[in-house]
Image (cartoon, rainbow, N blue to C red):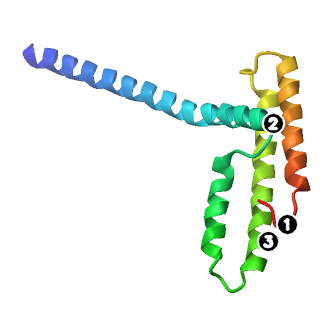
């Protein structure tokens, strides 16, 4: 009788622990994916420019390339790669804004999409030597 009760208590504690761990993990990953999208959208709408964290890795790579002999060619390729990456991220955010139910209403959705289009135009209009 005592072993049955002990097994029941232990299994209840284990199941409760698994449930709590799963809830925490879902909240954590939701915050990463949804929170980062909304944070990026907010920064893009406010500043009308690429978020600093997007361009940071390319700036670091440019600093590492500065001592390279073939700096100009590699710099142009890296900046092209950065622009392609920025445009992909902007397209992803635009699709996200269009389909998500987390945007308050259609007017705000259209405003955000227009802001994203403006930032896309800026990125597409940048010269080959601008990040």
Image location (x, y in percent) of residue 11: 25, 22
Residues tagged 1 and 3 counted as in contact (Cβ below 8 A): yes
Residue, x 91% and y 54% (percent of image)? 125
Question: Mark 3 — residue?
Answer: 76
Q: Quadrant of residue 101?
A: top right
Q: Say left or right for 34 vs 103.
A: left
Judging depth in this view, the residue of 80 and 91 nearest the camera is: 80
Where, by quadrant of the figure, is residue 95 drawn? top right
Q: Mark 1 points at which residue?
A: 128
Residue at 87 percent of width and 18 percent of height: 107
Q: What secondary structure is found at the residue carrying circle 1?
A: loop
Q: Quadrant of the C terminus?
A: bottom right
Q: Quadrant of residue 81?
A: bottom right
Contact between marks 3 and 2 (CB within 8 A): the answer is no
* Residue 89 image offset from top left, x and y in percent: 75, 47
Q: Residue furthest bottom?
A: 69
Query: Percent position (x, y) of residue 79?
Result: 77, 65
Q: Which labelled disc corresponds to residue 65?
A: none
Cα separation between marks 3 and 2? 29 Å
Q: Are marks 2 and 1 in contact (CB under 8 Å)?
A: no
Q: Position of residue 86 (x, y in %)?
A: 76, 52
Closer to the eye: label 3 or 2: 3
Q: In this view, does 72 lie above or below 85?
A: below
Q: In this view, does 45 lie above or below 80?
A: above
Q: Which one is earlier in the sequence, the residue at label 1 or at label 3?
A: 3
Cα gap from disc 2 to disc 1, whole angstroms: 27 Å
Q: Residue tagged by mark 2?
A: 95
Image-based side of 56 in relation to 120, left or right: left
Say whether disc 2 or disc 1 marks the residue closer to the N-terminus: 2
């Amino acid at each position: 009788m005592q072993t049955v009760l002990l097994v029941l208590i232990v299994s209840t504690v284990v199941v409760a622990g698994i449930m709590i761990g799963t809830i925490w993990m879902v909240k954590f990953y939701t915050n990463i994916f949804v929170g980062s999208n909304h944070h990026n959208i907010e920064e893009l709408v406010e500043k009308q420019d690429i978020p600093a964290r997007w361009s940071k890795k390319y700036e670091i790579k440019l600093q590492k390339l500065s001592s390279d002999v073939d700096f100009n060619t590699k710099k142009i390729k890296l900046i092209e790669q950065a622009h392609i990456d920025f445009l992909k991220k902007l397209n992803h955010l635009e699709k996200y804004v269009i389909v998500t139910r987390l945007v308050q209403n259609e007017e705000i959705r259209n405003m955000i999409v227009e802001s994203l289009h403006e930032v896309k135009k800026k990125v597409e209009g940048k010269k080959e030597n601008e990040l």
